Image (cartoon, rainbow, N blue to C red):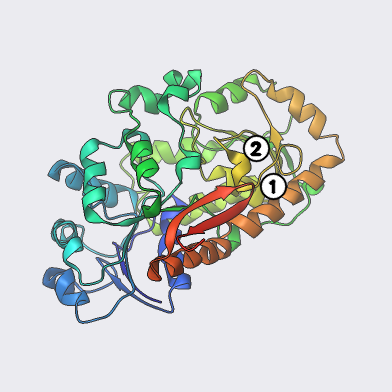
Amino acid sequence: MKILYIDCNVKHLNPTANLISLLFTHIADEIDHFGPGYVSDDEIKGGILKYANNNEYDFVVVGPNTNIINDSSKENIDSIKYISSYTSKNFDTNILYDFYKDIKNNINNLECKLKLLTLLNFDYYAATIDQVEKLVKSKLYILAPGIEFITDINHLDSFVIKEKHYKAKKNRISNNWRDFIKSNPDKIISTTHFVSDDEFYFNDIISREYDINIPGIKYYLRDKAVKQLIPNKYKINRDFHLKFYSFLNKLKLPVYSNNFSLKTYRQIFQKKLSNSKIVFTAKGGFGMTIRKFFEIPAAGALMVCNPPFNFDNLGYKDKIHYIKFSENDNINEFIDYYLNDSSSSIIAKSGQRLTLKNHSIAARVIQIKNALAQILKNNYLRSEWCRGEFNIHKITD
């Protein structure tokens, strides 16, 4: 399988965005990369058609840093500002203006008929009609969570109205994306976040220094759990690095665009997960399967969580792979019980094994490669996650 991978070569704080290029490098038998940081400025200015149309590619893949379905030139400018301020790169970001315009205008003119857009970090609930119509017309295949992971907005949890993200975009929230993937299942390869090999830690939770960690941005349920914690009762692995990085960013220091500081941030984050017995997380108001639902079990901690929508479809079962936490529960009761329960280590290891088997980069390579193979044969109907299995439905079934 020969693939042309189109994107700008940058490093994010977000690990999934960093791993997409590596993912397709493993999937492909042969791969070429096109974009700032991958090829010279002269090749970028020459355009994608000149670069690509002398080669025969099975697939063209557009990476996560190249938004070809944006609504306006303003969104291109916003994307460039984001790349400039929040990623590490080795190219002049001024070249992005030409690059984005070229890819957006010519993606449909590439001789390769099979094209794939990666949208694992897309804001699904804020998708516009215009964006959806562009996808329909583009005939792109899409790497994104399937319909089994997208909740109808009429069935969202009541606490969604307390989420900052919802408040900021409540006028744009819609079922546009859900309606699109429901009507076009043959264009979606159902995929969620995944973890890399270096995110797995195998030290037993009994030997870990800290009792509890609640990592990341404090969405409503996470913030509620943090406020419930009884001071001085537990050894808490607090996220002081978040405030420190935020402080440095306010001082205009390039902490999110410097490769060393980005690596340091990830190392601190992973050390906190791997040195905590229990790690708590929770879905946001939209119920999406964020990356922490894989990072925590990969690190070998006991995951206590309010699970995302249809988490069991990914194979995770309450009291087997994680501990389910409901909105009205008290986190202290869970900590007290599972710090002293012999099943904690067993559940943590079981969750880790499942994550390695189903949701590592190696697992995603096999899953996506199998789906692409059926697309190449014109035999792909749809894919879905059900009861821990990635199922590909074929036209010939």
Q: 380 or 384: nearer the eye?
A: 380
Name which quarter of the figure residue 326 lies in. Answer: top right
Q: Position of residue 136 (x, y in %)?
A: 25, 49
The residue carrying mark 2 is 237
Mark positioned earlier in the residue sequence (1 or 2):
2
Mark 2 is surrounded, within 10 Å at the Cα level, by few (under 14), some (14 to 19) or many (20 or more) other residues, namely many
Please state which amino acid type lies under the numbered disc 2: Asn
> Circles 1 and 2: CB distance less than 8 Å?
yes
Please state which amino acid type lies under the numbered disc 1: Asn
In the visual, does 380 lie left or right of 98? right
Instruction: Check disc 2 and report its element: helix, strand or loop.
Output: loop
Mark 1 is surrounded, within 10 Å at the Cα level, by few (under 14), some (14 to 19) or many (20 or more) other residues, namely many
Residue visible at 33% across and 28% down in the picture: 173
Residue visible at 48% across and 67% down in the picture: 369
The residue carrying mark 1 is 275
Q: 246 or 194: nearer the eye?
A: 194
Residue visible at 60% across and 25% down in the picture: 226
Which quadrant of the figure contains the N terminus? Answer: bottom left
- The answer for how far apart the CA atoms under marks 1 and 2 are is 8 Å
